[in-house]
Amino acid sequence: MDTLKDSNCRKSFEAAERSHATLAFIENENRTAPLGYRVIFLGDIIDRGPDSKRAMDLVVAELDRRLESRLILGNHEAFLLLFLDRPDERDLVFDHWMSNGGLAAAVSYGLDAARPYLRIGDAHDFGRMVVHGHTETTSGRPEVYGNRIALDTAACASGVLSTLVIEKNRENLFFATKPAENGTEVLSVSYPR
């Protein structure tokens, strides 16, 4: 079986005038080439170039079409995976990824680069109260701030699941539950101020 190696595919996508020609060539190869060869992609498919999503979509199509083909991850794919897999280090990884070309990849997947990235603890006025999970509260209880309500009480570790009930013309109601032998036990009910 013949092997084609594409080293640092991203660099082929850095210049817009070259990227479209390269993408068109790969798309044509995907449609017309016989199945008697495989492609080994040597990483750095995403970041820096304007078409990261399209480039990765083509790589995935090639991997699906030719089961012997392989993608060896580069450091730019590693940044993305670290960002997704390590929520406890997400801010550090995000900053590092963005400073190494990640913004171009994120934009190619639909991120609005003109919209500012806000950290969960920012005091930004969203124009309304934002309710969120995802980032565990330090107290292990729901936390109410001037611009947001944090509900993540680490249910996966503590077993305590917090819920906020919002009804029009009524006070918001928090309640926390945990699994019990006969169903669910309500631990607390409170009205946030």
Image (cartoon, helix red, strand yellow):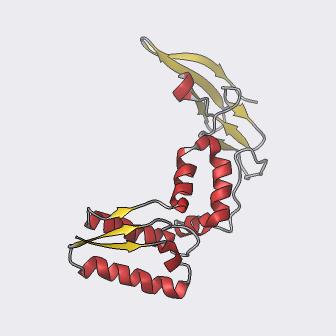
Q: Quadrant of residue 87?
A: top right
Identity of the residue furthest to the front in this view:
2
The residue sitting at 61% across, 36% down in the picture is 166
Quarter of the image that includes the C terminus = top right
Is residue 160 visible in the rendered image? The answer is no
The residue sitting at 64% across, 54% down in the picture is 94
Foreground residue among 152 and 87: 87
Task: State whether residue 174 is above or below residue 166.
Answer: above
Q: Position of residue 170 (x, y in %)?
A: 66, 33
Q: Position of residue 157 (x, y in %)?
A: 55, 25
Q: Position of residue 172 (x, y in %)?
A: 66, 32
Q: How many marks?
A: 0
37 to the left or right of 10: left
Task: State whether residue 138 is above or below residue 11.
Answer: above
The residue sitting at 56% across, 23% down in the picture is 158
Q: Quadrant of residue 88?
A: top right
Foreground residue among 158 and 12: 12
112 to the left or right of 2: right
Identity of the residue furthest to the top in this view:
181
158 to the left or right of 180: right
Quarter of the image that includes the N terminus = bottom left
32 to the left or right of 86: left
Q: Position of residue 180 (x, y in %)?
A: 47, 14
Is residue 63 visible in the rendered image? The answer is yes
The residue sitting at 34% across, 79% down in the picture is 27
Task: State whether residue 46 is above or below residue 156.
Answer: below
